[in-house]
Every structure is written in structure tokens, then in C-alpha cells.
Image: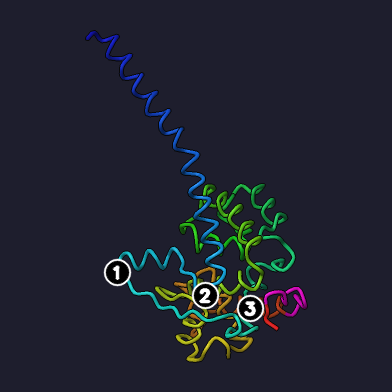
Amino acid sequence: MGMTEMAAERASRRRGFLAIALGWLPRVVLSLLALLILALALYRFVPVPSTLMFGRWLTLRPVEREWVPIEQISPALIRAVIAAEDQRFCSHRGIDWVELNAVLDDEDGPSRGASTLTMQTAKNVFLWPGRSYLRKALEIPLAMAIDLAWPKQRVIEVYLNVAEWGDGLFGAEAAAQRYFGKPAARLTTAEAARLAGALPNPIARNAAKPSRALQSASGRIQRRVGQLGPLGNCAVPG
């Protein structure tokens, strides 16, 4: 077989592999969509793990988390987290387009904020840690799907049970027990503000021994809670 024939045969094989891959692509996409719909339906009712928790389990590292329903989480913590992370949570449909457009126009891109609590829940439950345009692009449709499938209280319930508050420490109940020696239901306004203020850097910020930066953040969050008024009530039971 000559060189020309060999080259033609290799090109034919590549075209064949490409055709097979393209033929399977719609099936893979449909399968992933079906799995997502199933997960959204299931996760509306059962305790939800995060991808960080899965990663720790797979590498045999400890995970400290006790799932509690939203009725067993202090309303002060719910309002503090909304005030700190997503003040328009009760009014948007999973995406805060005003903030997101501002970030996309910024040269820092996805390295700065604009992630709503729904987007953070999507990241924690379905995606990987880190910052990239790809992950941000995936967060958007996932957050919209979550907002469609779950009520606001469920979004907050899942978020507060998967949020990281220390190395291997996940969820409001485990954080309240470690830092304040009490259940999440009994957190005070000041304690809730400290926990909310620790979220941007939970490994470095200790809610029980707050640094000046955390104390300052806690004060800002308490002021924002006062400014929220009824806008923070959509996720509070009762």
C-alpha cells in the first residue's frame, strides 16, 4: 500500500470516528439532561451532598455534617446569609442579571461576585470548585433549573446544609456546634452574622475567634439585615 493510500485510509478512519462520536453526542446530552431532571426531583426532598463532600469521601478524608431541616435553622442565619451573599434573592429567578451583567463587563470577569445563592447552590451540588468562564456558564442554566424546580425555602435549606464553614466542616448545624456549642436553631443575630461573614473564606475565618476583618464584615451584615426588611422573609419558615 502506497503512502497516498495509507493517508487516505487514516483520513477515512478519522471521519468514521468523528461520525460515531457525533452520532452518540445527542444520546449523551439527553442522558445528562435526564439525570439532571431526576436529581432535581430527588434533591427537592432528600438530604443533599456537595461535590466537595464527595471529593473528601473519595479521598478518605473526614466530613463533618449533620443535615437539619430549615425549621431547625435560626431565621437570623437565613436573613444574614441573604444579606451577605444575595440581597435580591427573594425577587430574582435564580440569576441576578443586573449584577451578572456588571461582572461580565468588568475586566476581572468571573473572579469577582455576582453569584446568587441559587448559583452557589448549583455549584456546590453539581459542579466543581474554582473560577472559570466555563463553570460560570454552567451555573446559569443550572440555577435557572433549580429555581424552577425548588421553592426559595428549599434552595436556602440545601445551601445552608452544604456550605463549607471549615476544613471538612459543612452545613449550619455542624458549624453552630463547633463554633458556638449550640444547635443552629439557637444562633443569635451576632453569631449568625459571623457565620455569614466567614463564608467567603471559611478556611481562614473562624467565627468563634473573629479577626478584625470578620468583625467588620459581621457588622456590615447586621446593618444590611436591618435594611432588607421583608425582602429577606421569602426563605424564612412560617
Q: Is residue 95 above or below residue 237?
A: above
* Residue 233 falls inside the magenta stretch: yes
Cα separation, mark 1 vs mark 3, equals: 31 Å
Q: Which image quadrant is residue 194 in?
A: bottom right
Q: Which mark is nearer the camera, 3 or 2?
A: 2
Amino acid under label 3? Answer: Ile
Stretch in magenta: 226-235
In this image, 198 relative to 101: left or right?
left
Q: Secondary structure at mark 1?
A: loop
In this image, 53 relative to 190: left or right?
left
Q: What residue does disc 1 label?
A: 60
> Is 79 or 149 nearer to us in this picture?
149
**Nearer the N terminus, badge 1 or badge 3?**
1
Q: Is residue 48 above or below residue 11?
A: below
Q: What residue does disc 3 label?
A: 78
The quarter in which the C terminus is drawn is bottom right
**Nearer the N terminus, badge 2 or badge 1?**
1
Amino acid under label 1? Answer: Leu
**Other residues around mark 3 within 10 Å, as few (<14) / some (14–19) / many (≥20):** many
| Residue shown at the point (29%, 69%) measured from the top left | 60
Cα separation, mark 2 vs mark 1, equals: 21 Å
Label ID, residue 161: 2
* Residue 94 falls inside the magenta stretch: no
